[in-house]
Image (cartoon, grey):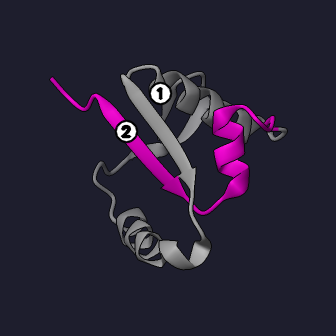
Amino acid sequence: MGAQQLQVFSDSQLIVSQVTGDYQAKDTIMSLYVTLAQSLRLGFSCFRITKVPRAENQGADALARIASAIDPNPGESPYFVEGWGKRSRT
């Protein structure tokens, strides 16, 4: 059991376009993130990523800043990808 559908909202046209495959990621690290996102989306029966205006995304930005300030796993970084779909460990 788990989520079957995922709807993502982003205020970054670049990110949306890279995940959908309309744009190619040129940066090596970003390319790894895009590859990971594209493989993870296959785990959902329905995946949508939608561009929203930055002004409509301020609440999500505030929550993201709060969440990034909390370290749920000290000594482990769940945010940085070093390899294909692998979390980095510090």
Q: Secondary structure at mark 1?
A: helix
- Quadrant of residue 38 in the image? top right
Residue 89 within the segment the image draws in magenta: no
In space, the residues marked 1 and 2 are separated at their CA atoms by 8 Å
Q: Closer to the camera, 33 or 4?
A: 4
Q: Amino acid at mark 1?
A: Arg
User: What percent of the width, then of the height, locates residue 67?
Assistant: 36, 64
Q: Closer to the camera, 68 or 4?
A: 4
* Pointer 2 residue: 6
Local crowd at mark 2 within 10 Å, few (<14), some, or many (≥20)? few
Q: Amino acid at mark 2?
A: Leu
Asked if residue 89 shows in the view, the reply is no
Which residue occupies 42% across, 69% down? 60
The numbered dot on residue 88 is: none
6 relative to 73, above or below:
above
- Quadrant of residue 54 in the image? bottom right
In the drawing, does residue 90 fall left or right of residue 1? right
32 relative to 84, above or below:
below
35 relative to 33, above or below:
above
The stretch in magenta equals 1-25
User: What percent of the width, then of the height, locates residue 39?
Assistant: 53, 22
Residue 22 within the segment the image draws in magenta: yes
* Pointer 1 residue: 41
Which residue occupies 56% across, 63% down? 52
Which residue occupies 52% across, 24% down? 85
